[in-house]
């Protein structure tokens, strides 16, 4: 049976504008008036004697003002870059770029920019303002040598988008084939930081990332929240030609309902990443992929159906991993790795959480994973609001450590600004 493109996937065509002089579209009165009106246009000149593409009166003056403002912006950006250069020199004349990177300070700058924008009720959105300031800071930091950031590749993945959202365009992004490789490159110093997915709002935790913290000395340096749109793409132009779909298991799960409704019976093949699925769609006849819009551009694929994710608020959270610890930013989160001596004992989890509850510390997430010490023994990953150095969390952690067989602060880091 031929499959039809769902109605929601079709882009509605724009209504044609009524043509002058057509009684069927303009009505008899307007048509008659147009028929009686003498023709006053000459070639290349409007009825008012103005060239058809001439600027409206006063636009030249506005452009001069824009040029003046641009010159001021340019001067101020250069001044900011020089000041950023001096900050780096004053800290460590022979240091590397990573030595000058301060995510807590960048988070404060972004929050202040958003606050100013809201007070001024500026015409640009908070997200656009934050993006502009992010790029300015990224360029200023990379004057000598850009940060090297490893991510789960290849190019065109959502993880790459998370890298650019958090660090800006002025970084050297290093695509790798697995989460394990990302950790290893950062551990060896080849990369300054790594970005890996940790959870999706509808499909839950990426367990592979959690398990890496059981053996890796790296910690958490930041978080990124990315609104995720999953798109169906391929070399074909019709859904009828789709024989198989390649995508990361998380992407397939996020689109489960749509696929069941519109491509029921089509083979679904899980692959290491959405970008890998896009590469196969480029190289294989009959293969379609679920991936980001960027992947369609990178691999030259047709966008068959955009935004096929089942939930409109589909969001993926990523962690920035590294070896450095940072100071409080004012609005922070902390991630813990904890375990009790006997996790199967009655009230074991209660005893771990009680000090946090008494100190009024808010938990935002808790996840259990096998400890790998013995069977049916578990560790807990806990996300909390607050910074480990500040109260009330600092006192709660001191009491918590006395109750645990394992208590490791994986990191305190700025809460995602946007």
Image: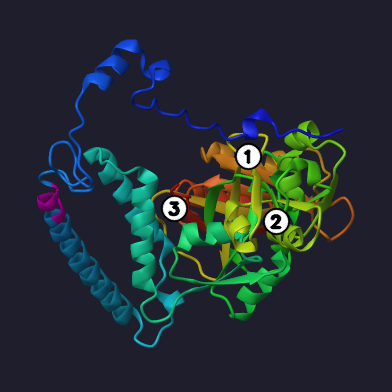
Is residue 89 shown left or right of residue 297?
Answer: left
Label annotation for residue 354: 1
Q: Secondary structure at mark 2?
A: helix
Label annotation for residue 390: 3
Residue 224: give x, y in percent of width and height.
Answer: 53, 53
Is residue 108 or residue 378 the one in the foreground? 108
Q: Residue furthest right?
A: 375
- The answer to which of marks 3 and 1 sits earlier in the sequence is 1
Gap in angstroms between the C-alphas marked 3 and 2: 40 Å
Q: Main secondary structure of the magenta part?
A: helix
Q: Are marks 1 and 2 in contact (CB under 8 Å)?
A: no
Residue 334: give x, y in percent of width and height.
Answer: 54, 52
Residue 316: give x, y in percent of width and height.
Answer: 61, 47
Is residue 183 shown left or right of residue 35?
Answer: right
Q: Which residues are magenta?
A: 59-63
* 403 in magenta: no
Is residue 126 shown left or right of residue 40?
Answer: right
How packed mark 2 is, by other alpha carbons closer than 10 Å (few <14, some 14-19, many 20 or more), is: many
Residue sitting at 59 percent across and 49 percent down?
A: 317
């Amino acid at each position: 049976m031929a499959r039809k493109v769902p109605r929601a996937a079709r882009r509605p065509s724009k209504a044609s504008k009524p043509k002058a002089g057509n009684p069927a579209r303009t009505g008899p009165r307007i048509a008659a008036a147009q028929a009686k009106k003498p023709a006053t246009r000459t070639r290349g000149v409007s009825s008012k004697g103005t060239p058809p593409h001439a600027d409206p009166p006063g636009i030249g003056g506005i452009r001069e003002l824009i040029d003046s403002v641009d010159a001021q912006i340019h001067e101020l950006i250069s001044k900011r870059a020089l000041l950023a250069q001096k900050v780096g020199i004053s800290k460590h004349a022979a240091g590397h770029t990573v030595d000058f990177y301060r995510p807590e300070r960048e988070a404060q700058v972004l929050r202040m920019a958003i606050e100013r924008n809201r007070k001024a009720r500026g015409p640009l959105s908070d997200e656009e303002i934050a993006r502009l300031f992010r790029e300015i800071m990224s360029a200023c930091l990379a004057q000598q040598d850009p940060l090297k950031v490893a991510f789960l590749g290849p190019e065109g993945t959502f993880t790459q988008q998370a890298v650019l959202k958090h660090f800006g365009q002025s970084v050297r992004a290093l695509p790798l084939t697995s989460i394990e490789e990302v950790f290893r490159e950062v551990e060896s110093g080849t990369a300054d930081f790594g970005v890996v997915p940790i959870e999706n709002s509808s499909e839950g935790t990426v367990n592979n990332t959690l398990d890496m913290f059981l053996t890796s000395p790296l910690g958490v340096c930041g978080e990124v929240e990315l609104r995720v749109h999953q798109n169906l793409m391929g070399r074909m132009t019709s859904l009828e030609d789709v024989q198989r779909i390649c995508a990361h298991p998380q992407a397939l799960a996020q689109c489960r309902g749509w696929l069941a409704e519109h491509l029921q019976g089509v083979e679904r093949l899980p692959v290491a990443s959405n970008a890998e699925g896009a590469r196969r769609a480029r190289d294989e006849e009959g293969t379609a992929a679920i991936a980001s819009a960027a992947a369609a551009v990178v691999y030259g694929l047709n966008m068959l159906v955009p935004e096929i994710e089942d939930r409109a608020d589909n969001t993926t959270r990523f962690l920035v991993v590294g070896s450095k610890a940072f100071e409080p930013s004012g609005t922070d989160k902390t991630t813990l790795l904890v375990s009790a001596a006997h996790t199967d004992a009655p009230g074991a989890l209660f005893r771990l959480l009680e000090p946090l509850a008494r100190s009024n510390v808010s938990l935002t997430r808790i996840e259990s994973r096998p400890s790998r010490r013995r069977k049916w023994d578990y560790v807990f990953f806990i996300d909390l609001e607050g910074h480990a150095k500040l109260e009330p969390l600092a006192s709660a952690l001191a009491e918590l450590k006395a109750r645990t067989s394992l208590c490791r602060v994986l990191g305190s880091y700025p809460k995602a600004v946007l």
